[in-house]
Image (cartoon, rainbow, N blue to C red):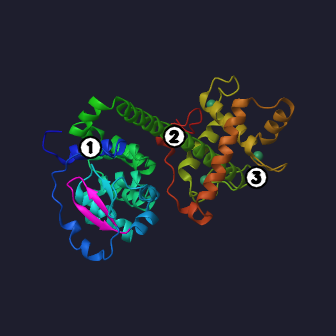
């Protein structure tokens, strides 16, 4: 490349380094502070690493072989030139990054600053030379440093280096910040050079949107079943203990009782019960509110586990009818969902807490077919 090396462009060069790590790309970066003091630590070097700019980094073959199987097999290869001086070339990556890499093979550590400066190159090196400890460190380090500017590069690199965690994280980052990422040079470069990855990203975003919609729908449904399950609790409680002025026929109804903890739901149900008891249109089946009450009573019978002495009206009659004729599949599936919502709500909160929880505002929710009050 003839143009000056910007950080983005040098990032892009890494892919060519990974694809053909022998290709020589002249780095214009000077060998900097990362190597200072490094020579001092190496007393009896038996191998030298040669970088793009011709720098020789002394090191130990046993340490290299222990840290990387790829370097081990390179060391075992017979040398082309007859010389006692063993050398390994690591080209196409800035000298500083190679120096940090070799240092990592000695100590298995690198600083946050080194990660900040060379993370992308270190990931490429860890992948090519099979150093899992460094790869893990880079995956974590780069995921923490995702920005609008580098997201596309990191994603591409994660895919090239087979780093699934980093791939997923940068994909998520990219899809949540897509409006801004779309403006970057990285994205424009990707559109021109990697249409398959562009498609992959767009597909991921589509699926993420679908997942969100599915979750929303699921939550809405669950809410409906939870409300029905609460209505079942209230119906039983009204018919056995009574609530405010509505209660079982054999209990004193003039005596005002305190509103219960689920009064929002309970009150709607009480209004419906009052209506059901006096409605003139009930008999000819033209009253929607009575139909609703009828369905709630039928639902109660379907979830009721009291054999004989249940006090909810029509419970026995419905049970006998089901025994004779059975239920349709749609109704059975509704019952199953209400039963599991009931089990779930009783599991999710301890009983004492349930009493204190804020009441569901039923009047604000459209309960399909089962709205308690109009
Ligand atoms: Zn009540
Ligand atoms: Zn009616
Ligand atoms: Zn019952």
Residue plotted at (51% across, 50% down):
360
The quadrant of the rendering that contains the N terminus is top left
SS at circle 3? loop
Residue drawn 28% across the image and 51% down it: 91
Residue at (40%, 34%) from the top-left corner? 200
Q: CA distance from mark 2 to mark 3?
A: 39 Å
Q: Position of residue 357 (x, y in %)?
A: 52, 59
Front position among marks 1 and 2 = 1
Q: Of label 2 and label 3, which has the lower sequence position?
A: 2
The verdict on label 1 being within 8 Å of ligand 1 is no
For the stretch drawn in magenta, the main secondary structure is: strand
Q: Residues within 10 Å of mark 1 (few under 14, many from 20)?
A: some
Nearer-the-camera pick, 329 or 203: 203
Residues drawn in magenta: 47-60
Q: Which residue is mark 3?
A: 250
| Pointers 3 and 1 in contact (C-beta within 8 Å) | no
Asked if the residues shown at circle 2 and circle 3 are in contact, with their CB atoms under 8 angstroms apart, the answer is: no
Marks 3 and 1: which is nearer the front? 1
Quarter holding residue 330: top right
Mark 2 closeness class: few <14, some 14–19, many ≥20 residues within 10 Å: few
Q: Residue furthest front?
A: 82
Vertical comparison of 122 with 173: above or below: below
Within 10 angstroms of label 3, few (less than 14), some, or many (20 or more) residues? few
Residue hosting label 2: 220
Q: Earlier in the sequence, mark 3 or mark 1?
A: 1
Q: Position of residue 26 (x, y in %)?
A: 19, 47
First in sequence, mark 1 or 2: give its number: 1
Q: Quadrant of residue 87?
A: bottom left
Measured as percent of width and height from the top left, residue 30 is found at 15, 58
Badge number at residue 13: 1
In the image, is 89 to the left or to the right of 232? left
Lateral position of residue 41 relative to residue 210, left or right: left
């Amino acid at each position: 490349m003839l143009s000056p090396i910007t950080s983005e462009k040098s990032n892009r060069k890494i892919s060519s380094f990974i694809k053909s790590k022998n290709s020589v790309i002249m780095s214009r970066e000077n060998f900097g502070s990362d190597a200072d003091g490094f020579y001092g630590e190496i007393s009896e070097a038996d191998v030298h690493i040669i970088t793009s700019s011709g720098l020789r980094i002394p090191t130990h073959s046993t340490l290299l072989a222990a840290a990387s199987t790829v370097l081990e097999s390179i060391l075992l290869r017979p040398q082309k030139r007859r010389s006692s001086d063993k050398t390994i070339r690591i080209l196409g990556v800035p000298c500083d990054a190679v120096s940090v890499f070799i240092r990592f093979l000695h100590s298995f550590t690198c600083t946050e600053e080194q990660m900040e400066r060379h993370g992308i190159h270190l990931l490429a090196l860890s992948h090519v030379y099979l150093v899992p400890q460094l790869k893990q460190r880079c995956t974590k380090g780069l995921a923490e440093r995702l920005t609008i500017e580098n997201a596309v590069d990191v994603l591409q690199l994660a895919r090239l280096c087979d780093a699934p965690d980093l791939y997923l994280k940068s994909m998520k980052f990219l899809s949540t910040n897509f409006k801004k990422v779309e403006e970057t040079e990285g994205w424009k470069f990707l559109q021109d050079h990697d249409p398959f990855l562009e498609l992959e990203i767009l597909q991921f975003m589509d699926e993420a949107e679908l997942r969100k919609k599915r979750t929303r729908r699921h939550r809405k449904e669950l809410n409906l079943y939870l409300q029905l399950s609460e209505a079942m609790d209230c119906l039983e409680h009204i018919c056995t203990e009574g609530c405010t002025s509505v209660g079982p026929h054999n209990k004193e109804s003039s005596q005002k009782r305190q509103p219960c903890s689920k009064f929002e739901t309970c009150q709607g149900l009480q209004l419906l019960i009052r209506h059901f008891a006096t409605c003139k249109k009930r008999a000819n089946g033209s009253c929607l509110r009575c139909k609703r009450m009828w369905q709630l009573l039928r639902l109660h019978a379907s979830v009721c586990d009291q054999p004989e002495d249940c006090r909810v009206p029509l419970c026995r009659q419905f049970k006998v009818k089901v025994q004779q004729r059975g239920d349709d599949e749609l109704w059975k599936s509704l019952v199953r969902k209400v039963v599991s919502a009931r089990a779930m709500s009783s599991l999710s909160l301890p009983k004492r807490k349930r009493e204190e929880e804020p009441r569901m505002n039923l009047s604000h929710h459209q309960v399909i077919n089962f709205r308690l009050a109009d």
